[in-house]
Every structure is written in structure tokens, then in C-alpha cells.
Amino acid sequence: MLEKDPNAFPPAPPASLDDARAVLEADWSAFTRIGRMSDHWDRPGWTAGHRAYYWMVTFAGANGLVDEALSCQNALAELAMDPVPADGLHITMAKIGNRAQVTGPQLGALASAVRGTLGRPFRLLAHPMAGSRGAIRFTLTPWTELVALHAALTQAGTRAGVPGGRGTPLFRPHLGILYNNRDREAATPIQAVAALRSRSPVELTVNAVQLVELRRGARAYRWDTLHELALDGAVQP
């Protein structure tokens, strides 16, 4: 279902979505091959008043994740990147559209169409640590359930007629903890992140998705949750 594309990161998906070693290797290998990191905040269209709607998985009450993210942020403090706040940790699932493109009734209809179609809750591991061109992040394993969730959300958006974003073939799950805030050589961040890769992963449970209105504040993303939809049934073993 996933495809190789130079605009995705990693450009090539892992050989297996369920094999943690394959996912970790794909993420780390891609990060170590970049020569420079770019300014994450240098993105056209993100003005002070810009708002957009997204599907996200958020982690209110996930104390283990918060503690590990803070510990890793502290260990990487000399990089002077912008930390993701404890209440800002998230997995971006799928774009719905900008506020100018999507109406409130459309969002309500989309949420109603999605409800009951998302499968069962599932577990993930957040592994310290890798990165991309613009961020430092946890690698998530496995990917199968996240890819299936992305596909369900994207297909519902297509049926609802919202603009949407990247299709499922280009989806690369990740969970960022630091945003790079300037153009720089990548060698020093890669070396610093490498020292954290022996840390134990954190177990997470995905039991809901949130439809949010996203905005950008002072070097951080903030959002208002408009709809929260539970995944149905017992957690997958």
C-alpha cells in the first residue's frame, strides 16, 4: 500500500510494516543520509491567522510518553531546537483541509461518516530515536494499524468531498519531539540522537482519533479538538 517517493520521509517505506527492526532501520538509515536539516517553520502559507483541519492521534494522560519525551529533549538541549510541549505530543494522521476550504457542516458530516469504521484500539511502541529533515522524533512500530487507520480516514474524506492531503501511499507515521529551527549541517544532530538509540521504547495505546482545528503559535503547534471518535472493541493483543 505504501510507495517510494522522494517527497516522503523516509522516501522508501520499510520492507515490513510489522517488523520493528525493518521500520527502525528504514527510519534511521534515511536520517543518517541527510546532509543538512532545514528550518521546520519555514513553510509557505502558515501565517499567523492560518487554520487547518486535521485528523490526529493525541496522548492526553500518557505520562510514560511525556516523561520519555522530556528526558530526550533534555539530553538534546545543546542542539537548541524547539521542544514539542508535553500537551502537544501527537501523531498527524491526515489533513482534511484549510478553514477556508471546509465548512462546519462538512466536518460534522465527516465525523459522522467515520464513526464506527475505524477498527479496534491497538498498541504501539515509540522508540528513541531518529529524525527527519526538519525534526527529531520517535520511531513508531508497528505501522500496519496506523496505515489502515490513515486509509479509513482518507477514504472517508474523499467520500465527504473535502480537499484532503497526501494519500496513504505516502504516509509515514512518526511522533516528533523537537522541531529544527534553522538550516544546519545534520552531522551533529545525528551524532547526538545516536546516543539515545539504546533507550527502551514506550508502549502507547491508540483508542481514539481527534478531528482538530490546528494553528501555529510561538514555535509550537496548538489545536482545538472538534470531534473525538473512539476506536471500537478491545485492544488488539
Image (cartoon, rainbow, N blue to C red):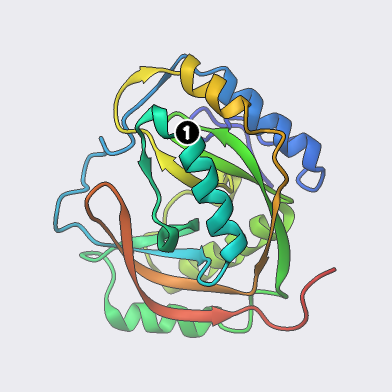
Residue 113 lies, in percent from the top left, at: 52, 81
Task: Count every numbered label the image shows and give the total.
Answer: 1
- Residue 10 appears left or right of 79: right
- Residue at screen point 72% across, 30% down: 25
**In the image as oriented, which residue stretches furthest toward the right?**
237
For numbered disc 1, what is the local secondary structure?
loop
- Residue at screen point 65% across, 55% down: 147
Circle 1 residues within 10 Å: few <14, some 14–19, many ≥20: some
Tell me the residue that label 1 is attached to.
76
**In the image as oriented, which residue stretches furthest toward the left?**
48
Q: Which quadrant of the figure contains the C terminus?
A: bottom right
Q: Nearer the viewer, residue 107 or 193?
A: 193
Residue 20 lies, in percent from the top left, at: 78, 42
Q: Is residue 208 above or below residue 83?
A: below
Q: Nearer the viewer, residue 11 or 179?
A: 179
- Going by the numbered disc 1, the residue's amino acid type is Leu
Residue 110 lies, in percent from the top left, at: 44, 78
- Residue at screen point 64% across, 74% down: 207
Residue 235 lies, in percent from the top left, at: 77, 75
| Res. 83 image quadrant | top left
- Residue 118 appears left or right of 70: right
- Residue 98 appears left or right of 57: left
Q: Nearer the viewer, residue 84 or 156?
A: 84
| Res. 185 image quadrant | top left
- Residue at screen point 61% across, 37% down: 129
Q: Is residue 226 above or below residue 133?
A: below
- Residue 200 appears left or right of 228: right
